């Protein structure tokens, strides 16, 4: 099949959704399909190029930051995508499309179907589902007619976790199926050996955007209850809350225990995971976290908030710990327990096994391809 993948962010630009889009595109190529990506332009990147057999078309966009995109920037991508999609479809003889995010990208898929007859699947990622991100509730209500037209005219709607599926079906009267995220277990692997260091100092890792969803002030307040001589907190990422977080770290007296890595190239991430003792995800909500899967694949126990998405990945007491956000002492308790190196190793081994057996990107791509075949066959 000749498949178009539409997403306002695509590697090296973006975070979790970009990672998933890049991995799915690569896996589809390996399965013998042809893939064209329609995404936003970014400084330093050519408007069209080929990478590992994937044709990448970057249309004009106002995006200015590698790590995040504001609503106006997303709207600029939508406007450009609507203008360019008919030409891209015809030039590359696109047969079907996978559209990440019902909004802002969904209307591009809808126009491609109306003008060019290209059937599309909507891949719901999290913030595009009403109720997932409270700050967007007003916008979701405002855009409801467009979003519902997008979902109604797709041949299938897909969520990356069971929790997100339930939320989507509660918000809109359309069925949603689950195709979870995957992880590259040949790239993300446990360390063969770790450098000798003081194992009484727990090396805690967070990877992701510094934004409200990730609940980082909560994490800082909890680790502040531990003596600063017993832990290191490594924060990988960037975002709008960075300066506020730095101020809070100074206020809490834990600034000396924190290392701010900024955004790192994907090639450096396995080493970051391998050098840590555990990963913490204290998110207010998640779809299905690529970071959690990557950490588990690298043999890290994960301490995660008990929210949909995390609950489907982390087995409490086996591959890590789940904690209730209403009971913050549970996070401190989990961190204290993981000072036991033997427990870390046992949980890390279980986490690696679960990630390796949970799903691969090849399986994710195959499920999308099979969904096209099934839905199109039944429509004939």
Image (cartoon, helix red, strand yellow):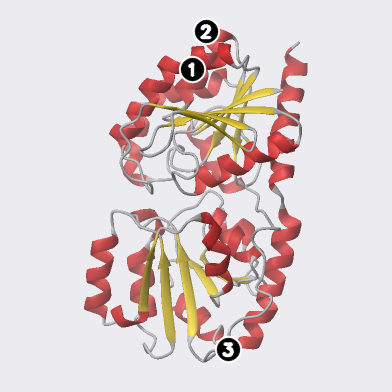
Q: Which numbered circle lies on residue 306?
A: none
Residues 187 and 238: in front is: 187
Q: Sequence order check: which comes first, mark 1 or mark 2?
A: 1
Is residue 41 something one can see in this rendering? Answer: yes
Q: Is residue 226 above or below residue 82?
A: below
In this figure, which residue is indicated by the disc labeled 3?
196
Q: Residue at position x 55%, y 85% from top? A: 337
Quadrant of the frame with the N terminus: top right
Q: Residue at position x 36%, y 65% from top? A: 216
Q: Which numbered circle lies on residue 115?
A: 2
Q: Sequence order check: which comes first, mark 2 or mark 3?
A: 2
x then y, percent, for residue 13: 44, 43
Marks 2 and 3: CB-CB under 8 Å?
Answer: no
Label 3 SS: loop
Marks 1 and 2: CB-CB under 8 Å?
Answer: yes
Quadrant of the frame with the C terminus: top right
Q: Residue at position x 73%, y 18% from top? A: 376
Between tags 1 and 2, which lies in front? Answer: 1
x then y, percent, for residue 230: 43, 89
Q: Residue at position x 68%, y 46% from top? A: 361
Q: Sequence order check: which comes first, mark 1 or mark 3?
A: 1
Label 1 SS: helix
Label 1 packing within 10 angstroms: few (<14), some (14-19), many (20+): many
x then y, percent, for residue 282: 45, 64
Specify whether 41 is left or right of 298: left
Q: Is residue 199 above or below residue 38?
A: below
In this figure, which residue is indicated by the disc labeled 1?
85
| Distance of label 1 from label 2 (alpha carbons) | 10 Å
């Amino acid at each position: 099949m000749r498949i178009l993948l539409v997403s306002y962010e695509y590697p090296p630009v973006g975070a979790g959704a970009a990672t998933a889009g890049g991995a799915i595109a690569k896996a589809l190529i390996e399965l013998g399909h042809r893939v064209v990506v329609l995404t936003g332009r970014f400084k330093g990147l050519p408007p069209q190029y080929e990478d590992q057999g994937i044709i990448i078309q970057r249309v004009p966009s106002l995006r200015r930051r590698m790590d995040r995109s504001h609503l106006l920037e997303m709207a600029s991508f939508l406007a450009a995508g609507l203008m360019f999609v008919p030409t891209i479809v015809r030039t590359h003889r696109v047969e079907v499309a996978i559209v990440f995010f019902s909004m802002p990208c969904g209307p591009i898929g809808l126009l491609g179907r109306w003008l060019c007859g290209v059937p599309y699947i909507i891949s719901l990622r999290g913030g595009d589902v009403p109720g997932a991100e409270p700050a967007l509730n007003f916008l979701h209500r405002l855009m409801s007619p467009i979003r519902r037209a997008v979902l109604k005219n797709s041949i299938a709607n897909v969520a990356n976790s069971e929790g997100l599926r339930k939320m989507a079906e509660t918000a809109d009267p359309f069925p949603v199926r689950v195709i979870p995220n995957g992880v590259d277990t040949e790239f993300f692997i446990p360390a063969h050996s770790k450098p000798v260091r003081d194992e009484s100092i727990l090396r805690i890792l967070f990877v992701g955007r510094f934004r409200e969803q990730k609940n980082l002030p909560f994490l800082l307040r909890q680790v502040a209850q531990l003596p600063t001589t017993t832990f290191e907190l490594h924060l990988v990422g960037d975002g709008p809350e960075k300066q506020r977080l730095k101020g809070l770290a100074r206020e809490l007296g834990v600034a000396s225990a924190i290392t701010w890595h900024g955004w790192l190239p994907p090639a450096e991430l396995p080493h970051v995971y391998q050098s840590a003792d555990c990963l913490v995800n204290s998110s207010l909500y998640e779809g299905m976290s690529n970071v959690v899967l990557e950490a588990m694949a690298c043999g890290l126990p994960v301490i995660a908030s008990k929210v949909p998405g995390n609950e489907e990945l982390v087995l409490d007491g086996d591959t890590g710990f789940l904690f209730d956000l209403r009971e913050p002492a549970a996070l401190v308790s989990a961190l204290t327990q993981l000072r036991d190196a033997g427990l870390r190793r046992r949980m890390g081994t279980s986490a690696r096994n679960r990630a390796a057996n949970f799903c691969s990107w090849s399986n994710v791509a195959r499920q999308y391809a099979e969904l096209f075949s099934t839905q199109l066959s039944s429509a004939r």
